[in-house]
Image (tube, helix red, strand yellow):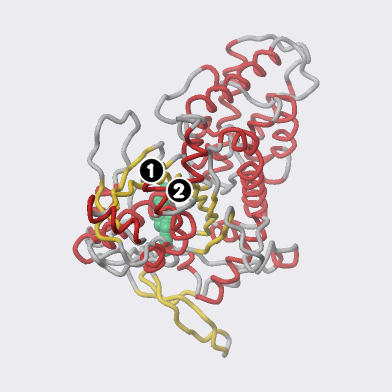
Amino acid sequence: SSFLTPFEDALAGAGDLGRALIGRDRVRLAVTGLSRAGKTVFLTSLVANLLAAGQGARTLPAVEAAVGGRLRGARIVPAETQSTPRFDASGHLLALASDPPRWPERTEDLSTLEIALEIEPRSFLGKARGMLAGNRSVTLELLDYPGEWLLDLPMLNQSYADWSRETLARLRRGRRAQAAAAFLAFVDALPAGAPAEESLARQGFSLYRDALRTCRDTLGFRFLQPGRALNPGPRGEAPLLWFFPLPERVTGELAPLLRRRHEAYLDDQRSSFFDPFFRRFHRQAVLVDALGALHAGEEAFDDTAAALAAVAASLRGGLGLFDLLTGQGVRRVGFAATKADHVPSRSRDALLGLLGDLVGRDPAGPLDATTSVHAIAAIRCTEDDVATLEGRPVSVVRGVLMEGGVMRKVYPGEVPLRRPDAAFWEHAFFEMPVFQPPRLDGAGRAGIPHLGLDALLAQLIGDLL
Ligand code: GDP
């Protein structure tokens, strides 16, 4: 079927005619985010809103427009014999529908879910076919994978020596150096002729992983590799993972052992994840908590920016040659700054500019179908409001705080239009409380309030529906 795919794609590009000829009605959308970006909430809202739209609720207007108002139904495809875990949309909706509403537990693993969309044919040919065959059913296949794994993409094109050098240089900078102090002391004390001893390799890996965890969990850093060191995935931990960056001066037998593991790890990620899952997918949503990164401060922000730039470059070029040869792989990427309901509408425009700057994409520039940027809130918890700050009116958001359950006006601070300079950080102020999700009518059957989820979806998959 890999021979058929470019042909199928060409035909699918020809609209209903193409689809009628090949009967291809499967759209594959992968979703991930730099960790804690809001992926679980995003997928839960997407599923609930699609199901509601299938019942006629006007909850995703841009998607409705993309299908010409012809969405006639949506349902979750019951589980069959899949070997990958299933995304627990209904469990997450139950959390949101509880009283008081709770945020769903975050998901850690790879999971999938299929939604069948019933769409009334639009063209004459489609209508004629529709009269014979009824509505067209398009299966939207969602793949949710750990954001940590996204950072394995830039590793695919790097040798162990290059990766070691860059990773150690990064670890030695700023607050990372404190978080990684034990690991750095360990590698710096290794003799040049360090032997390929199991206990030594295990100790190094375990110190390295502790450093990665501290960077992620207490400093809010995102440029952390390899992904499975932080998130081993459904297959658990295996010896190929037990590598870490090694200074160039160490040339003993330990070096080739770690190099072989690094190579084996990448081969394994390629053959067990990138090839079977990732490359089958047509579209990719990458979620980024850019506001959270602003809130976390200069170093965390710069780190997120660097991670994002590396990811954007790999999605553009890293798998590109392969794509040209086989016609497969991701060909549309939507980057979305999440939790945009934390700032009032004018700041959301700034957020869009900031994200565009980070991924090298001017939101006002010429339309580029392959990469787009968005500022979204998968679940909108606030309304815009005005407050007085030092005698002047300022735009704020109003919402119920999770802590205490009271309604508050929050002035979040200003969102810079592009990557902020040193002056910005001198007076940096950015407020980011946890808001309570809104109460849902009928467990979300009427949809979930959001900001821009529909525009993101329409841009990513609208042409395939
Ligand atoms: P994940 O680790 O990427 O799966 O992150 P989650 O989807 O679990 O989101 C983490 C937290 O971010 C949630 O528990 C919420 O507190 C917050 N969050 C996520 N999306 C939104 C949103 O659209 N609006 C607001 N206000 N908060 C959000």
Residue 69 visible to the viewer: yes
**Circle 1/circle 2 CB separation < 8 Å:** yes
400 horizontally vs 224: left or right: left
Residue at 77 percent across and 18 percent down: it is 250
**Mark 2 lies on residue:** 12
Image x and y of residue 448, in percent: 31, 64
Q: Residue at x 44, y 54 (%)?
A: 15
Residue 409, above or below 57: below
For numbered disc 2, what is the local secondary structure?
helix
Looking at numbered disc 1 in the image, what kind of residue is underneath it? Arg
Q: Is residue 341 found left or right of 190 in the rendered image? A: left
Amino acid at the residue labelled 2: Ala
- Where does residue 30 sit, x and y in percent of width and height? 45, 44
Instruction: Return the residue nearer the eye: 246 or 452.
Output: 452
- Asked whether 269 or 434 is in front, the reply is 269
Task: Kindly indicate the quadrant of the structure image that contains residue 267.
Answer: top right
Residue 463 in the figure: left or right of residue 162: left
- Residue at position x 43%, y 24% from top? 236
- Is 433 on the left-hand or right-hand side of 372? left
Q: Helix, strand or loop at disc 1?
A: loop
Q: Is residue 434 visible?
A: no
Q: Residue furthest left?
A: 442
Q: Nearer the viewer, residue 327 or 310?
A: 327
Q: Quadrant of the N terminus?
A: top left
Q: Quadrant of the C terminus?
A: bottom left
Residue with the mark numbered 1: 24
288 vs 183, nearest the viewer = 288
Query: Where 292 sits versus 222, above or below?
Result: below
| Ligand 1 quadrant in view | bottom left
